Every structure is written in C-alpha cells, then in structure tokens.
Amino acid sequence: MVALVTGGSRGIGRACSIKLAEMGYYILINYQSNETEALNTLAMLREKGSDGEIIKFDVSSVEEVEKAISQWQAAHPDTYIEVLVNNAGIRKDNLLMWMTDEDWNTVLNISLNGFMYTTRAVLKAMLVKKYGRIINMVSLSGLKGLPGQTNYSAAKGAVIAATKALAQETAKKNVTVNAVAPGFIRTDMTQDLDESQLKMLIPMGRFGNAEEVAETVGFLASKGASYITGQTISVNGGLYT
Ligand code: NAP
C-alpha cells in the first residue's frame, strides 16, 4: 500500500506521512527543496518500523510532477499510489491593493494547480484499480475568507469546490475525494503569527498541532471512511466562520 504526501518534508505533511506510515502505508515523501527535512521525515517513520522514500518535485510544475510520478510508477509496475494527500502549500499575504502578480500566481499555482497536476497524475491508476483516497489540505481561509489572504483564500476555496466536483466524478469507482480545513496550526508557516493574541479568537484557546490534523487525514484515508466523499472537515479548535 503506497501513499504520496506532497509537502511531506515539514509541518502538517510530515505528521500526515507519519500517521499514514503507522497505518501500514509505504510513504512517498514529496518536497520541493528541503531535502534535509524530507530525509528527517523518512528517518522518523523508519524509527517507527515503517518505510518510504523521498521524491522531489515542485507541485506547480506540470513537467516535474508528471515526470516524477510516471518514473516512479514505471519502476513499480506491481503497485500504485492509492492514497494522495495534496498538502503542499504556501502563504504570500498582502492586502489586495498591494499584492503583486507574482504573489497571486505563486500561491494559486502551488495550491490549486498543484492539486490538479498531482491528482491527475495518480488518478487513472486509482480508477483502474477501483480504489483510492484523495485528501486535499485546504484552510479555514478558504471557507471564511481572511483579510490579507485573497490569493490564499481564493486558492483554497477553489480546491474546496474542486473536491466536491471531483468526488462526483470518481464516486462510482470507490475513489473518495475529501478536504481537511485546518485553522491555526503550529508549523513553520505560522511562525510569524502572534499566537498569544490570536489564541483569544479560538474557543479552545490554543493553536492546534500538526498531529491533530493528521488524525483526520488518517481517518479519511482509512477503509472506515468509505461512504464519505466530497466533504470538507474543519480541524480548528472551534474557530468557526
Ligand atoms: P509548512 O510547514 O510551511 O510546510 C510546507 C510544505 O510544503 C513543505 O514540506 C514544503 O516543502 C512544501 N512545499 C511548498 N511549496 C511546494 C511546492 N511548490 N512543491 C512541493 N512542495 C512544496 O506548512 P504547513 O503549515 O505544514 O502547511 C501544510 C498545508 O496546510 C498547506 O497547504 C497549508 O496551506 C495548509 N494549512 C496550514 C495551516 C497552518 O496553520 N499551518 C492552516 C491551514 C492550512 P520544502 O520543505 O521542500 O520547502
């Protein structure tokens, strides 16, 4: 059983890689540039008796995605990627009136196009085998909209809509497509945020940790989630819209 986690080198993607490894998956740990951290994720899951490998590609480059996944598939003709976690993502916050084309496009290219390129590259095998689990990491920002994040909210909101559409395309083949929407989670991405102030907005009074998000991903990837598709599950300490 093989699972691919994009952005598995750090943060939520690392926690998802470890969780899926504990569930018995061989993990393809994708990263863009941070090979050291990708290898650390691999070492962490090996420590727990699981296994995997690192796989470098930029999810926003259709050429890199297709090359990496087709090469992996060609080298492993007897198996296929049955779980995909589309987790890679970045923030480039600014008020829209100051936002550059580059900051708009980079965020959309990684979160939205990255979802499309990676999913398309693994989907055919899932449909042929009549089993698959696709889990998209979105955000509270894509449900509620957050000021300073029109690019990020647009990208995540688009992935939520795409989750619903794709779920209907693939349901009859037992390929479920769901999204997980974290609130504020303590990772490199949120290092610059003032937790002492922001936690006052959160009913649970704290930021979440990556493992709490990974638990939901693990459930959606499990056989037990067989009748759930097209959904977005929030993991946000009660911070509703
Ligand atoms: P993070 O700690 O900053 O890690 C980002 C990960 O994405 C890294 O593994 C990074 O790889 C990878 N990545 C970035 N651009 C990539 C690209 N073009 N191609 C391939 N991989 C790429 O972020 P995080 O907080 O764990 O966030 C993970 C996901 O959760 C994101 O989609 C984010 O939007 C979402 N999310 C996070 C929060 C939060 O509060 N943290 C809340 C809501 C949603 P390298 O290590 O190689 O750079």
Image (spheres, rainbow, N blue to C red):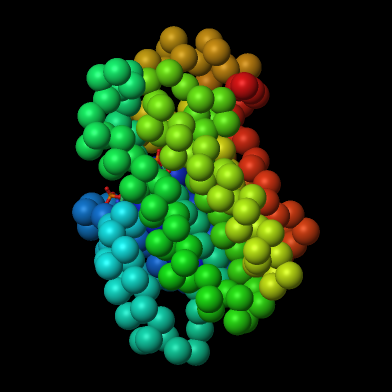
Residue at 53% from the left image edge and 70% from the top image edge: 123
Residue 20 is at least partly visible in this image: yes
Residue at 74% from the left image edge and 62% from the top image edge: 226
Left or right side of 88 for 3: right
Give 99 or 123, whichever is nearer the viewer: 99
Residue 192 is at least partly visible in this image: no
* Quadrant of the image occupied by residue 205: top right
Expressed as whole percent of the image width and height from the top left, the position of residue 47 reads 41, 62
Q: Quadrant of ligand 1?
A: top left
* Quadrant of the image occupied by residue 96: top left
Expressed as whole percent of the image width and height from the top left, the position of residue 19 reads 53, 55
Residue at 78% from the left image edge and 59% from the top image edge: 227
Left or right side of 81 for 219: right
Q: Is the residue 64 above or below the residue 91 in the image?
A: below
Quadrant of the snapshot with the C terminus: top right
Expressed as whole percent of the image width and height from the top left, the position of residue 114 reads 38, 54
Give 222 or 146, whichever is nearer the viewer: 146
Give 166 or 29, whichever is nearer the viewer: 166
